[in-house]
Every structure is written in structure tokens, then in C-alpha cells.
Image (cartoon, rainbow, N blue to C red):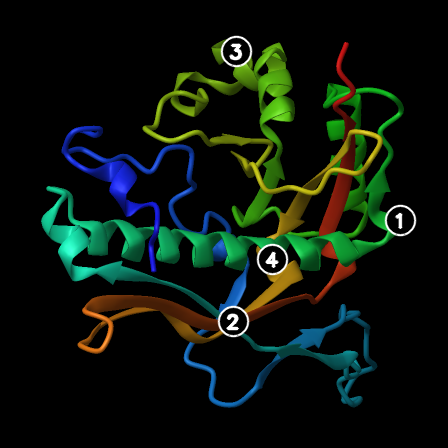
Amino acid sequence: MATTIDQAFVKQFEREVHEAFQRQGSKLRNTVRTINNVNGSSAVFQKVGKGTASTKSTHGVVPVMNLDHSSVEVSLQDFYAGDWIDRLDELKTNIDERQIIANAGAYALGRKADEMIIDAMAAVGSGQEIVDGNQGMTLDKIMDALGLLGDADVPDDGERYAIVGWKQWSELLSLKEFASADYVGSDELPFKANFQAKRWLGTLWIPHSGLPIDGNDIRSCFWYHKSAIGHAVSSDVQTDVTWHGDRASHFVNNMMSQGAKLIDATGIVEIKADETPD
């Protein structure tokens, strides 16, 4: 049972209860390749290699490209987030406790979806890595990463994304090439929208608080194409509220079944950034 509900009684809290500092759901789901409504315990993403154009002689047979076909299987995982709400405790507070816990569970599952996607990105390997060099996020690192994406023929088709930590986001804002209208134009300034994101170098840059950091304060950031990561969804986030008379309580349950995996390592670059305190 939610034993801490007494802390939210009217005498101690105002009616408005804010769930501070929680990312509301997944920020990354729409930035990766997604299959919805999967039936079964896994989903298969098809991977196709590059084709090569060739000439042919007059009346000759048109040469085939012999594309390399492979597949990547993504296993689905089930996740749950629930809590009990005592009926008499509800009467002592003037907040909608059921809605608060339902939202908290849904947000927790959204963060879990992002965690799976980020874990898939982290499997990219050292061949697609820009080392930290005892520095934070710098313009040189960004240009080096851009070169890796270009050399791999990653499409510049509006579906490139980059996720960085908040420390790196603040460092990017100090770069005139990133934040100055003289370089990017007034329509692409980072604070124009009502959310923290910005389009630069044909990429949507997004700050994220869930990126991995190692014991040496080295943060992993990722620049990727949407097709490089597969995200499979069997059941999207669902919420169920049931009454249990034997407990005189409601049980709020949130659940989902999803999975994520790296599809094409050449479509993603990991940028390491040092966060060691000055």
C-alpha cells in the first residue's frame, strides 16, 4: 500500500501536486524505427545493404545489384509499474491520488522505453566512437562525428537525431555555430519552440537526462539516423485501475511490452564527453 500517502494530506500540501523533475514519457520513440502491434515474443527488422550501379552492353542483360539482405530480431520484454491506494486515505486528501500514481507509472514506463533505446545505441562499438579527449562537447568533436556519418553515406534526409546530456547541451549553447542566428538563422534558434530541442546540421538535437556515464565522468552522447535503431512494441503503455474490497483499496497497474536493438552500426556515432567537475 502507498504508506507515504499521509504526507500528502491537506494540512501539509496544496491541491496542486506536481510530479517535479520527471520526464513525461518517452522522448526517443519517434526518433527510431518502430514496429507497432507486434504479435509474439519478438519482432524482425530487415536490413538491406548498398546497391551498385553497373553498365550493360547493347541488348545485354541488365545487371542485378545483389543487395545484401539480413535481419535483426528484437526480443520483447514486459514491464509493470503499480501501487495500492487505500480508500480511506483518499478521503483524507483533496488530490486525485489515483491519477497521480497512474501518471507516475506511465512516466516510469516511458523512461524505461528510452532506456532500452539508449542501451541499444550503446552497443555501437568503438569503431563509431569519438573519444572524450578530456574535453566536453566541442565543435571539433561534432565535425569529426559528422565526417563519420558522411563517410558511411548516412542519408541527410531530415531523419537524423542527436541526443546529448544536459551538460553537453549547455556547452552547445555556448557555441556560436549552434546558438547564433548569424550561423543558423532565426527560425532555428534553440529556444524558439516550447521545448528544449534544436535543428542544426540537418539534425534534431535533443537534451536527455538518461544517457550513460561511466565512473570517470565520461558521458556517452549519440548522433544517429532513425533507421539505425529498431524499437518493437507489442503492447503500448496501458493503465488499469481495479477495486479490491478485501483491501478496501484500488490497485493502479501500468504495463507495456516493448524491446529495442541496434540494426545498423554505421548509422550511429557515439560522442564521448568529459563531465569531470572543474
Q: Which mark is residue 117?
A: 4
* Comes first in the chain, label 4 or label 2: 4
Whether residue 95 is situated above or below residue 139 in the rendered picture? below
Identify residue for label 2: 258
* Comes first in the chain, label 4 or label 3: 4
Whether residue 137 is situated above or below residue 265 in the rendered picture? above
Identity, as a three-letter code, of the amino acid under mark 3 = Ser
Identify the residue shown where x is 61% and y is 40%.
162
- Mark pair 4, 2: CA separation: 10 Å
Identify residue for label 3: 180
**What is the x, y in percent for residue 240?**
27, 71
Identity, as a three-letter code, of the amino acid under mark 1 = Ser
Whether residue 198 is situated above or below residue 191 in the rendered picture? below
Between label 4 and label 3, give the one nearer the viewer: 4
- Mark pair 1, 2: CA separation: 27 Å
Between label 4 and label 1, give the one nearer the viewer: 4
Identify residue for label 1: 126
Identify the residue shown where x is 53% and y is 15%.
179
Q: Is residue 260 left or right of residue 87?
A: right
Quarter of the C terminus within the rendering = top right
Identity, as a three-letter code, of the amino acid under mark 2 = Gln
